[in-house]
Structure formats: C-alpha cells, structure tokens
Image (spheres, rainbow, N blue to C red):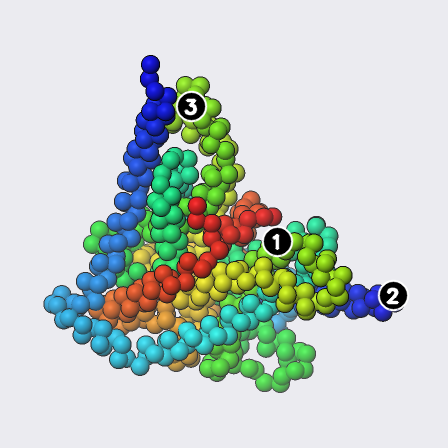
Amino acid sequence: MRRNLSITALRLALAAIGLAAAAIVYAFPLYWLIVTSLKSKAELFASTIHLLPHNPTLEPYVSVLIDRGFWVLLKNSVIVCGSTVVITIAVGLLITYPITRLPVPVSLRVGVLNWALSLRFLPPVAVIIPYFAIVRTLQIYDQPIALIGIYSLFNLPFAIWMLKGFLAEIPLELEDAALVDGANRWTAFRRVLLPLAAPGLMAAATIVFTFAWSEFLFALILTATPNAQTFPVGVQGLVTQFEIIWNDMAASGVIAMSVPLVLMVIARKYMVAGLTFGVIRDK
Amino acid sequence: MQNPVRAGRRRRSRQERLAYKILLPALGMVFIIVTIPFVLAVVQSIQADDGTLVGLRNYARALSNPAFYDALRATGLYAVIVLPAEIVLGLGFALLVHRTVRSPGLRATLYILAVVPLVVPPVAVGVVARLIYAPGYGVLNVILERLGIIHQEIEWLSVPALAMFSVASVDIWQWTPFVYLVLFAGLQTVPKESVEAAQVDGATWWTQFIYIELHYLRPLFLLILFFRAADILRVFDHIFILTGGGPGTTTQLLSLYLYRVEFKFFQTGQAAALAVVVLVSISLLYTLVTRLLPLERT
C-alpha cells in the first residue's frame, strides 16, 4: 500500500515537472515577444538586456501602426480575409448542401469529398508560378482581389469538410417538415437549416479567417505596395531590413498574432476538427 | 388516382435534378480555377523564356542542378528531425495528461493552451524565433550566459548544423501541440473496460500502452504523418524569416528553393518544370496513401 502511494507521488511529481517544462518552453517565447514589444528605443541600445519589463511603453505600437503606416496593411488584411470568408463559406455551402441534404449517388458525394481533400495537399509554392502569370495577365497584380480568389480556393477544402460534418448532423426530417408545410426549398434552407447550422458556420468562418490571416507566401509574391499588401508582408519587411528595429518588429508580431488568438476563443472547440478534417470531433 | 410510389420517385428525381443544378456550376467553377494553373504550369515548363518550345530541356536542366538535390536533402533532414520529435513529445504529453490529469477544468485549460501555438501566424512565430536566436540580440544566448553555461555567443543561425536545429525547433514548437491534441482525443476513445480489465491482470504503464492504447492510436499516427508530411513540403514562412534558407543553402527546403528559382533567378521554365515534378510526385503519393486515412467520407 505504501509502495503504491510513493509510486503515485513519484508519477505526479514527474507529471508536474513535465508540464512545468512544457509551460516554460511555450510561455517564454511569447512572453519575450510581448516584453520586447514594450521596450523604448533607448532601451534597445542599453548595454544590458532586461528579462523583466523595464519602463514599458506603447511607443513601438504607435511607431508600427501610425509612423510606418501599417494600419493600412491591417485594413487590407481585414478586407481580404473577410471577403475570403464570405466566398469560401458561400461556395462551401453550394457544394455541401446538395451532397448532404439532397439524394445524390454515394459515389458523387465520396468523389467530391476526396477531391476537396486532395486540394488540401496542393503545395502553394508549386502552383504560385502559374498563378503569378495568370494574375499578371488579368492585370490584378497588387490588388486585393487576386489574394481573395486564391485564399478562397485554398480554404475551400477545410470549409467543405467542416460544413459537411455540421450539415450532416442536422436531421433531414426538420427540413422535410417545413417542405410539407408548403415552404419551398430556399425558405426551408433559410428558415430551418441555416439557423441550426449557424454555430457550425461561425466556427468554419472563424477558422477560414484565421488561416487567411496567417497566409504569407501568396501575399508576398502577388502584392508590391500598401495597396494590397497584407499585415504578414509588413511584418516580414521589418525582419529582413538591414538594421532590425527589435521593438517595432516584436510589436508587429504581437499585432499579427492577437487577431487569431481572439478569434480562437470563439472557435476553440472546432479548431482541431478543422485541422484534421473532422476526424477529431469531441471537446 | 396517382400511384404514390411513382409520385415519390418523381419527387426524388426532381430533388436529384436540383442537387445537380446547385452542385455542377459551383464544382465546375472550382474545377476550372484549379485546373488552369496545372495546364499552364505544364505549358510553361516546355517553353523557353521567350516562348519558344524547348521540349524537355527545362526538365533536364532543373533536374541536373545539384542545388535541387541539396534542397531535397535539406527537406529530408528537416522531416527526419521534426516528425519523430513532434510525435514522441506529443505522444508523451498525451499519455502524461491522460493518465495523471483528472480534473476536467485543467484538461480544458490544457486544450486551449495547446491550440494557441496552432493559430499564431508562422510569420509571427518567425519573429519570436528571431528574438530568441538572432546574433547580438537573441535572448537564448543572454540566458545561457547568465546561467554560466556558455561564455561565448553561440551563432545559432550561421553554423549550418545549429541553423537547421533552430529552424526545426520552431516547427516542433508550433506543431507538437497538434500531435498532442490529436493523440489525446484518440486516447479518450479507448474503452475504459478493457483498460480496467488489463489493470486487474497486472498491466503496467507500458504494457497498457503497447497492447491496448496503441491499437486505438494507430490510424491517428497515420493521419498525423500524412498531414505533417504535406506541411513540410510547403513550409516556407518561418524559415524565410529566420534564416532565409541560409547559411549558404543549409536550410533551403524545397519550397524555398522553388521560390528562389522563380523569383530570384527568374528561371520560369525551370521553376515550372520543378513545380510539375513536385505536383506529379505528390499526386502519386496522395493516391497511394489517402485511402488509408481514417476520414469519414460519407
């Protein structure tokens, strides 16, 4: 009995140590990013580096957003990601509604889902060369619309698989009841299905927004000026400068990650489902 | 009097027609948008920069360039460091939390904390990594010096082996939580009865894992490997920010190499040829492996 107790205690101690180590490895980099983003210019050139906040200031944030004009990039990001979400969810619904709510052959449903899955494995860098040529030809280089189109396409697989999961869970009888009562398909969709699917749609929309927000490669290549550049491109510009202004760079990093972190609170339950195409559903 | 069976069938076929009416335009549009670039890539790959057809010359040039094989080697090395580390650490933590943490509140908190790294944009993760590893200002050297472990700055980003380690560590930081979340969720599907029965029979931590839990996790390992491998082929952002592929070409993975051929050397034909090679290889791999994935397709 005593032996069991001591073994349990040992295990708990090991577990605590393991979790504490993980906590430090995960928390410290983010902590350090925030601390650096609150440093004044003078402190950057101080001879000793303070690990604790030392006269914190919001100066770098003002410098990034106002002086460097990054608020424009933030605005571009919001426009691009918002439009991407609307298009992706709309097209996603057009594809998932028929295959989950209407009688179509199983092979068609499986075929559509498999095809969507295969798009998930398309490496952007391999298709960017032809896309670059297309964007040039259509004369939409350095315009938000180019990014919106491509982001919508690349997020469609996630949207299809997530929406399919949510729609399939709503009993067909609910819509049928409305149809029997004389509603047409569109009304039944709008009045019955859409409200029931709303939480799922919100989750999918949030995740698509997050993914689009993080995208960097297409934005780097298909934009050139603040006319269409998104926020990650601006962040990158601060990093690869000849002389790095550490506090500004850190502040831009904090801004870049704060938006998805806030959104995550809404969609946290569905995040893993989205990343694994619905294999992991619980929680 | 109308035959009710026939009326039902007619209603069904009307619904099916509606399904196609909605589905086909949407699918058709997406299909065209996806397919045009493929076709264009093939066309670009058999053209010289002035538009004359050169057959497979671009392929021959691209595939005979030793830098391509350096990029493949770097990608392989990266995968060999990153995948086992993420799986071992993620599995370790999943088992640890599954067996020691009982409080639902703490489990939920750990879930949220594990999601955090997954939503941080890779560009921002690259910024964090710079603050840690950069020469002169990197905080890792500062900490190691204050702890008395080192007395001279370690050049994390300019010594080839260390640069690869630094770049890989960022990937491990960001994606181990994903492995943890997937495997932890998998562990919750193991039936309690079989675990209890095994414990009555005297199963230890290890035998319980090998003989019972592993069985339920196996399809998930496959899923993780597949998703992560696909991600490694596209990894770009944090390396671009942290080392830019350097020193030399040590951390220039396949995606960075392709980027360089097209947008730094402006060799569109060769870049397109490489893109076609990559796309064809991935499609082949995809058709071979995808059927094994535990996805609900119906």
Q: Which of B284 and A222 is in front in this view?
A: B284
Q: How crowded is mark 3: few (under 14 residues within 10 Å), some or many (20 or more)?
A: some
State the residue lying farthest toward the right: A2
Classify residue A164 as left or right of residue B113: left
Mark 3 and mark 2 on one chain:
yes
Q: Mark 1 lies on which chain?
A: B
- Quadrant where the N terminus of chain A is found in the figure: bottom right
Going by the numbered disc 1, the residue's amino acid type is: Thr
User: What residue did someone put label 1 on?
Assistant: B189
Residue B23, compared with residue B85, is above or below; it is: above
Q: Nearer the viewer, residue B138 or B116?
A: B116
Q: Is residue A87 above or below residue B183?
A: above
**Which secondary structure, mark 3?**
helix
Residues A217 and B72: in front is B72
Identity, as a three-letter code, of the amino acid under mark 3: Leu
Q: In which quarter of the image is residue B276?
A: bottom left
- Disc 1 secondary structure class: loop
From the image, tell me which residue sits under label 2.
A1
Residue A87 in view here: no
Dot 3 corresponds to which residue?
A: A179
The residue under the point 48% across, 55% down is B294
- Of the numbered discs in the image, which one, if any, rests on residue B297? none
Q: How crowded is mark 1: few (under 14 residues within 10 Å), some or many (20 or more)?
A: few
Q: Mark 3 lies on which chain?
A: A
* Residue at the image position 30 percent from the left and 60 percent from the top: A127
Q: Distance between the residues labelled 3 and 2?
A: 66 Å
